[in-house]
Amino acid sequence: MKSLALTKQSLLFRIRYLILAMMLMASLVVSYPTHAQAIDSTPDGLVKTMVSDVMNTIKGDKEIQSGNISKVIDLVETKIVPYTDFRKTTQLAVGKNWSRATPEQQNQIIVEFKTLLIRTYAGALTQVKDQTVTYRPFRMDPTDTEVVVKTQIMNKGDPIQLDYRLTKAGDAWRLYDINVLGAWLIEAYRGQFNTQISANGIDGLIKFLQERNIALSKAK
């Protein structure tokens, strides 16, 4: 019984920080605005600048800290959206079933998944207070097109592992996945998405996402 309790406690601990990390990529996009490339041409530089900007904005805005959803949406749209690739995130989360979806269905899944992440993890912003982020040594080959930038969140207690996976899109790098304590965001959703598709098809997944978004909007 004691080991079971510890397992549950460990799971809750992981979920808490996975939620916090997910909020940093809660709104992701398909397009790649050219102005975003000015932030930094290196993957570790992009992550450092983006994370610093997001955390400083949160710490200086009491409305965001209190969970003002319109302020949350504005934050992610302006500070995170230009530097991420949500089409890749969504495609990998859906997995092998992605090719079964029509282009229209794919776009619907992208839109609903984006909305779900924003609404689900908006509350995690209130957790950003006195945390600081340290960056592990980063090395890459000039020919690399997929990299992982490793960081740690320094808070009370032990440091929290937080890694960012990026892909190269043309001359720019874009974030598409996050790992907290060994749990990657894409993997966290893939099983749930596949279960929905196996039971109810692609339209069933879309309906599931829509219903979750409706429920979350009413709960706010």
Image (cartoon, rainbow, N blue to C red):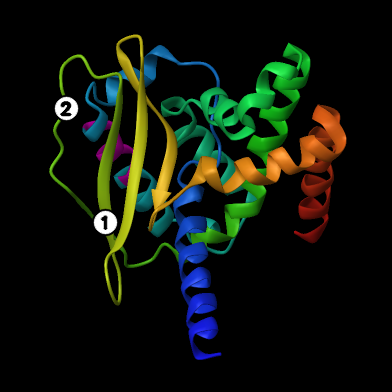
Q: Nearer the viewer, residue 206 or 126?
A: 206
What percent of the width, then of the height, locates residue 144?
24, 19
Residue 48, magenta (yes or no): yes
Corner quadrant of residue 194? top right
Horizontal relation, residue 18 to residue 113: left or right:
left
The answer to whether 27 is drawn above or below residue 109 in the figure is: below
Which residue appears at 75% of the width and 25% of the height?
108
> Which residue is farthest top?
170
What percent of the width, then of the height, locates residue 73?
59, 42
User: Is disc 2 in contact with disc 1, using a CB cutoff of under 8 Å?
Assistant: no
The answer to whether 107 is drawn above or below residue 125 in the figure is: above
> Looking at the rendered structure, which numbered label has been put on residue 168?
none
What percent of the width, then of the height, locates residue 205?
79, 36
Which residue appears at 62% of the width and 55% of the height?
68
Q: Nearer the viewer, residue 220 or 177?
A: 177
Measured in 3D between alpha carbons, the distance from the residue under mark 2 to the one under mark 1, in whole angstroms, is 19 Å
Element on which disc 2 rests: loop
**Residue that carries the numbered disc 2 in the rendered image:** 140
The answer to whether 97 is drawn above or below residue 68 in the figure is: above
Which residue appears at 12% of the width and 43% of the height?
137
Horizontal relation, residue 91 to residue 167: left or right:
right
**Residue that carries the numbered disc 1 in the rendered image:** 152
Q: Amino acid at mark 1?
A: Gln
Q: Quadrant of the N terminus?
A: bottom right
Q: Quadrant of the C terminus?
A: bottom right
Q: Nearer the viewer, residue 181 or 18?
A: 181
Q: Residues within 10 Å of mark 2 (few under 14, many from 20)?
A: some
The answer to whether 46 is drawn above or below residue 98 in the figure is: below
Q: Amino acid at mark 2?
A: Met
Which residue appears at 45% of the width and 35% of the height?
80
Corner quadrant of residue 113? top right
